[in-house]
Structure formats: structure tokens, C-alpha cells
Image (spheres, rainbow, N blue to C red):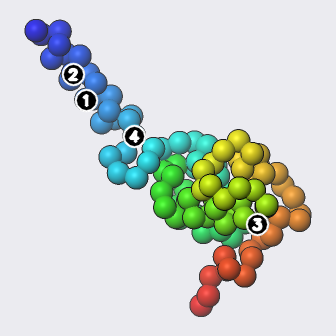
Amino acid sequence: MKRRYMVITIACIIGFLGGAPAFGGSHDQRTRKAQDRLQQLGYQPGPADGVMGQKTKNAVKKFQRDQGLPETGSLDDKTFQELKKNRSDTPQQSDRNRKKY
């Protein structure tokens, strides 16, 4: 009986300290890198917090569209590889991604 409570307690502590956030996806280093790169390219993914939220998904879709990739909004291997490329022919800011002031 004590062991069961100990296991539950440890699982709760691990979930609280290092688990996924309660709302909106999971923290991920790959997602954070993609958010940084999307921001550099002008796609406005929101904060580079490693959470695959709606702003990041929308930015990924726009990037995928501009690169001729399937518009899934998912950070699949092909999309991530395209993001990692340092290409001069990658649009820095398309008209639909540019902030209007």
C-alpha cells in the first residue's frame, strides 16, 4: 500500500517538474529551434517556448506552403530539414506574413 502511494507521488512530482505543460502541447527543443528559425524568416510563430501551439502550427503551414510542402502544420522531418537550411532563396518575409503597422 505504501509503495503504491510512493509511486503515485513520484509520478506526480516528475509530471510537475519536467512533464508536458497542462495546456497546448509539449515542450520540445526541436519545436523551439523551429520557432526561432520561423521567427527569423518572418513567419510569426509566437514565443520560442518549445510549445507547438496554434500560432506555431499556423506559421509552419505558411512555411510549408511557401516551400511547396504538404500543408500539415506538423513539424515533420522534411519540414524541419527545410527550416534548417540556410538558403538565400527562402523568402525572408512574404507579403502575407509581414506585419502591417
Nearest to N terminus: mark 4 or mark 2: 2
Task: State the CA–CA distance, disc 3 to disc 4.
Answer: 31 Å
Q: Are there few (<14), some (14-19), or many (20+) residues within 10 Å of tag 2?
A: few
Task: State the CA–CA distance, disc 3 to disc 2.
Answer: 47 Å
The relative height of residue 26 versus residue 3 in the rendered view (above or below) is: below
Task: State the CA–CA distance, disc 2 to disc 1.
Answer: 6 Å
Task: State the CA–CA distance, disc 3 to disc 1.
Answer: 43 Å
Look at mark 2 in the image and give the residue it sits on.
Answer: 8
Kindly report which numbered mark, 3 or 4, lies closer to the viewer in this rendering: 3
Secondary structure at numbered mark 1: helix
Residue for point 75% across, 56% down: 69
Quadrant of res 57:
bottom right
Quadrant of res 77:
top right
Badge 2 vs badge 1, beta-carbon distance below 8 Å: yes
Look at mark 4 in the image and give the residue it sits on.
Answer: 20
Identify which amino acid the numbered label 2 is placed on.
Ile
Identify which amino acid the numbered label 4 is placed on.
Ala
Secondary structure at numbered mark 2: helix
Residue for point 15% across, 17% down: 5
Answer yes or no: is residue 39 visible.
no
Identify which amino acid the numbered label 3 is placed on.
Asp
What percent of the width, then of the height, locates residue 50?
52, 49
What percent of the width, then of the height, locates residue 52?
51, 52
Look at mark 3 in the image and give the residue it sits on.
Answer: 66
Secondary structure at numbered mark 4: loop
Nearest to N terminus: mark 3 or mark 2: 2
Look at mark 1 in the image and give the residue it sits on.
Answer: 12
Kindly report which numbered mark, 3 or 2, lies closer to the viewer in this rendering: 3
Badge 3 vs badge 4, beta-carbon distance below 8 Å: no
Badge 3 vs badge 2, beta-carbon distance below 8 Å: no
